[in-house]
Image (cartoon, helix red, strand yellow):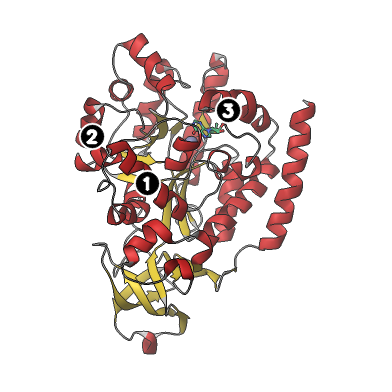
C-alpha cells in the first residue's frame, strides 16, 4: 500500500465543523484511511497543509465544460436570445477536436480552483471522457439530446446516442466516470420522446439529468399546453426519481418543491448563470427547508464566465439571502455543504465528505493571504472570501493533481495556447458561416 499524508491543516468535517487534523490516504485504493492527529509518520509521502484549510474537493453539479471556448463570445443577453442568436450557431461549428481542447481548458481551470468532480451535459462525449481520464478528475458525463427542430429520425438518433453513450462510458477511467441519460430540457425534448426513452433509461439503470424551470419562458408553455407545472409534467413523463437531478430549478412553486422533496430528486443551483442571464432567483432556502438535496454548479463558462466553485459559493449565499429577503438565509455552513456533499449526493458520488473510507478527493486552500485574515471562522472564509487562486493542492482518487499550484496531469501553458488558437479558429468559421 502506498500512502500519502496531508499534514498540518485545518480540516472541514462532514458536520461542517473545522478542526486541526491530518488526513491519511491509501493511494492504491484512492480512499481516505484515517483523519486524526500526527499521521505523517505512517505515510510514504506528505503534502504540507499548514496554514491551510483542507476541504472535500468541490463537486460542480452542472456544467458544459467545453464551453470554455465560448467564454466571452456573447454576454448580456437572456437565455433564449443568447442560445439562439449566439451560442447555438457557434456550437454548430464545433469539431470533436475543439471539444477536446475546450474540455482540457475547463478541467485545468477546475483543478486549479479545487474542483475534483463535475457533471457535464454536452456532445462528443468520448473526447470529454479522454480528457477526464488523462487529467485524473471524476466526472458524471452524458450526451445531451434535443428533439425540437429535428425530424423524427434525427430526434430518435440523438436520444439513442444519449442512451448508448451513457451505457458505454459508465465506469470508464477506472471508475472515475459515471453517466446520466440527458434530455436537454422539458421544452426542447418532445413529450412523446420522453415517454419512449425515459423507460429505456430506467431499464438501463441510468440517472437522468436535465435543465428544468430555468426561466419563466420554460414554465408558461408547459402550463399553457398541459395545464400542470413543469415538474408535475416531468413526473407524468417518468422523470424525477430519487437518482435524478435537475439543473437550475429557479421558477419552482410550492407544489413543485414538495414534489422534489417527495421524490428525492435533487436540484443543482447555478447562481452565477441565473444572475447573468437574468433568469431569476432560485428559492434555495425554501428547497433546503423542505428537505430537497441542493448542490451547486457553474453551468457553462459562456454564462458565468468562470468555472470556480468558490465564486459559486459566494454567489449562492448572496442571491439566496436576496431571494428569501432574509440575511440569515443560505448561511455559510449551508453553502459549504452544498458545494461538497450536496452536489456529490445529487450526482450519485461517494465523495463530498472527508471521513475514513470515503474517496480521497480533496482541496487544500492556502490561508496565508490578506483576504483570509484573521482566521475567526474558516467556514465563513470558504463561503464568502476564498478565491480560486487560494487553492494550492488538489487531490482526486488519492492522486495529487495539483501540488503547490502546479497542475501535474495537464501542461497548463500548452492547454491555454491550444485553447486560444482553437477558439480563434472556431469563431472565424462561425462568423463566415
Ligand atoms: C446539446 S449540449 C447542451 C446544450 O445546452 C446549452 N446550454 C448551455 N447553458 C445552458 C443553459 O443555462 N440552459 C439551457 N441550455 C444551456 C449548451 O449551449 C448546449 O447547446
Ligand atoms: Zn446548463
Query: Looking at the image, do the residues carrying marks 1 and 2 touch, with CB atoms under 8 Å apart?
Result: no
Estimate the spatial distance between the alpha carbons at disc 2 and disc 3, rounded to whole Å. 32 Å
Query: Can the viewer see residue 72 in this picture?
Result: yes
- How dense is the environment of label 1, judged by Cα within 10 Å: few (below 14), some, or many (20 and up)? some
- Alpha carbon distance from label 3 to label 1: 25 Å
**As displayed, is residue 364 above or below residue 343?**
below
Which quarter of the figure has residue 206? top left
Q: Secondary structure at mark 1?
A: helix
Residues 398 and 212: in front is: 212
- Residue 189 image offset from top left, x and y in percent: 46, 21
**Circle 3: is it few (<14), some (14-19), or many (20+) Cα within 10 Å?**
some
Say which mark, if any, is on residue 318.
Answer: 1
Residue 32: assigned label: none
Ranked by sequence position, the earlier of labels 3 and 1 is 3
167 with respect to 199 (left or right): right
Question: Which numbered tag is attached to residue 82?
Answer: 3
> How far, Cα to Cα, is label 1 from label 2?
28 Å
Q: Position of residue 161 (x, y in %)?
A: 53, 32
Q: Residue at x 52, y 36 (%)?
A: 143
Give the label, 3 or 1, closer to the camera: 1
Quadrant of the drawing holding the C terminus: top right
Left or right: where 357 falls relative to 413: left
Q: Secondary structure at mark 3?
A: helix
Give the quadrant of the N terminus. Answer: bottom left
Where's residue 109, x and y in %?
57, 56
Instruction: Please name which of the two marks, 1 or 2, marks the residue nearer to the observer.
Output: 1
**Is the C-beta separation of discs 2 and 3 under 8 Å?**
no
Dot label at residue 263: 2
Amino acid at each position: 500500500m502506498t500512502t500519502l499524508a496531508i499534514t498540518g491543516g485545518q480540516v472541514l468535517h462532514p458536520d461542517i465543523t473545522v478542526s486541526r487534523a491530518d488526513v491519511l490516504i491509501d493511494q492504491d485504493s484512492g480512499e481516505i484511511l484515517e483523519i486524526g492527529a500526527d499521521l505523517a509518520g505512517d505515510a510514504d509521502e506528505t503534502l504540507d497543509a499548514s496554514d491551510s484549510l483542507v476541504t472535500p474537493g468541490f463537486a460542480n453539479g452542472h456544467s458544459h465544460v467545453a464551453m470554455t471556448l465560448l467564454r466571452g463570445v456573447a454576454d448580456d443577453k437572456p437565455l433564449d436570445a443568447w442560445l439562439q442568436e449566439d451560442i447555438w450557431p457557434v456550437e454548430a461549428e464545433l469539431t470533436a477536436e475543439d471539444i477536446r481542447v475546450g474540455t482540457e481548458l475547463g478541467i485545468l481551470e477546475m483543478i486549479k480552483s479545487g474542483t475534483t468532480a463535475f457533471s457535464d451535459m454536452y456532445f462528443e462525449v468520448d473526447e470529454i471522457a479522454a480528457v477526464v481520464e488523462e487529467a485524473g478528475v471524476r466526472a458524471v458525463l452524458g450526451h445531451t439530446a434535443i428533439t425540437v427542430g429535428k425530424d423524427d429520425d434525427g430526434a430518435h438518433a440523438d436520444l439513442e446516442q444519449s442512451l448508448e453513450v451513457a451505457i458505454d462510458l459508465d465506469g470508464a477511467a477506472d471508475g472515475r466516470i459515471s453517466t446520466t441519460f440527458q434530455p436537454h430540457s422539458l421544452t426542447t425534448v418532445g413529450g412523446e420522446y420522453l415517454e419512449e426513452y425515459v423507460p429505456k433509461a430506467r431499464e438501463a439503470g441510468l440517472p437522468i439529468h436535465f435543465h428544468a424551470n430555468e426561466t419563466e419562458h420554460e414554465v408558461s408553455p408547459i402550463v399553457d399546453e398541459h395545464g400542470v407545472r413543469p415538474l408535475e409534467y416531468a413526473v407524468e413523463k417518468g422523470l424525477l426519481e430519487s437518482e435524478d437531478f435537475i439543473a437550475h430549478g429557479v421558477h419552482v412553486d410550492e407544489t413543485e418543491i414538495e414534489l422534489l422533496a417527495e421524490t428525492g430528486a435533487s436540484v443543482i443551483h447555478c447562481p452565477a448563470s441565473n444572475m447573468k442571464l437574468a433568469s431569476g432567483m432560485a428559492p434555495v432556502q425554501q428547497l433546503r427547508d423542505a428537505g430537497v438535496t441542493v448542490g451547486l454548479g457553474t453551468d457553462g463558462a459562456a454564462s458565468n464566465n468562470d468555472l470556480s466553485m468558490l465564486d459559486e459559493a459566494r454567489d449562492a449565499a448572496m442571491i439566496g439571502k436576496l431571494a428569501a429577503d432574509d440575511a440569515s438565509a443560505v448561511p455559510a455552513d449551508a453553502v459549504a455543504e452544498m458545494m461538497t456533499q450536496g452536489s456529490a449526493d445529487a450526482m450519485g458520488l461517494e465523495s463530498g465528505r472527508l471521513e475514513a473510507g470515503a474517496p480521497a478527493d480533496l482541496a487544500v486552500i492556502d490561508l496565508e493571504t490578506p483576504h483570509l485574515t484573521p482566521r475567526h471562522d474558516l467556514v465563513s472564509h470558504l463561503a464568502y472570501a476564498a478565491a480560486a487562486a487560494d487553492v494550492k493542492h488538489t487531490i482526486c482518487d488519492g492522486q495529487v493533481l495539483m501540488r503547490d499550484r502546479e497542475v501535474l496531469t495537464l501542461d497548463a501553458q500548452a492547454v491555454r495556447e491550444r485553447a486560444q488558437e482553437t477558439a480563434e479558429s472556431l469563431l472565424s468559421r462561425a462568423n463566415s458561416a
